[in-house]
Image (cartoon, rainbow, N blue to C red):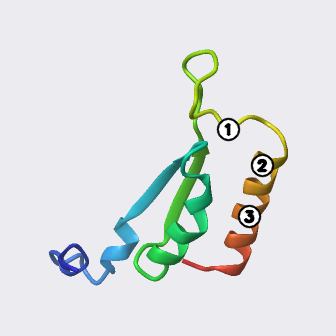
Amino acid sequence: MKYIEGPSRNGKPAWKDIWITMTINSINYSTIEDLVIEWKGIINKIGFQFHTPFTENDPLWLQYGQVRNEIILKIINLKKNIRM
């Protein structure tokens, strides 16, 4: 991975400089765990936020309720069980 090799960083590993952010929506919410597992050991931080609807009945909006609550619990459990 060329982006990991990169230029000298005075002894600081490159992965310390790589962050990922994911905007969770009605299409991609099922891929959160896959993303975390795929990048484990390469980066040390992932930020999650929920899509903010811009129009009424925005198809990407993940409404408040059971599914959204389960996603939040999944992220909390991933944070406890998978160290980046």
Q: Mark 2 or 3, which is nearer the eye? A: 2
Q: Amino acid at mark 3?
A: Lys
Residue 71 lies, in percent from the top left, at 73, 55
Q: Nearer the viewer, residue 27 or 69?
A: 27
Q: Which residue is mark 3?
A: 74
Residue found at x 33% / y 80%? 13
Label 1: state its secondary structure: loop
- Mark 3 neighbour density, 10 Å: few (under 14) some (14–19) many (20 or more): some
| In contact (CB < 8 Å): disc 2 and disc 3 | no
**Left or right of 66, for residue 81:** left
Asked where in the image residue 55 lies, by quadrant, the reply is top right
Residue 48 lies, in percent from the top left, at 58, 52
| In contact (CB < 8 Å): disc 1 and disc 3 | no
Separation of residues labelled 2 and 3 (CA atoms): 10 Å
- Mark 2 neighbour density, 10 Å: few (under 14) some (14–19) many (20 or more): few
Asked where in the image residue 74 lies, by quadrant, the reply is bottom right
Residue found at x 68% / y 71%? 78
Separation of residues labelled 1 and 3 (CA atoms): 15 Å
Upstream in sequence: badge 1 or badge 3: 1
Q: Quadrant of the C terminus?
A: bottom right
Residue 8 lies, in percent from the top left, at 17, 78
Residue found at x 39% / y 72%? 16
| In contact (CB < 8 Å): disc 1 and disc 2 | yes
Which disc, if any, is residue 62?
A: 1
Q: Which residue is mark 2?
A: 67
**Left or right of 18, for residue 69:** right
Q: Nearer the viewer, residue 2 or 28?
A: 28
Q: Is residue 35 above or below residue 82?
A: above
Q: Amino acid at mark 1?
A: Leu
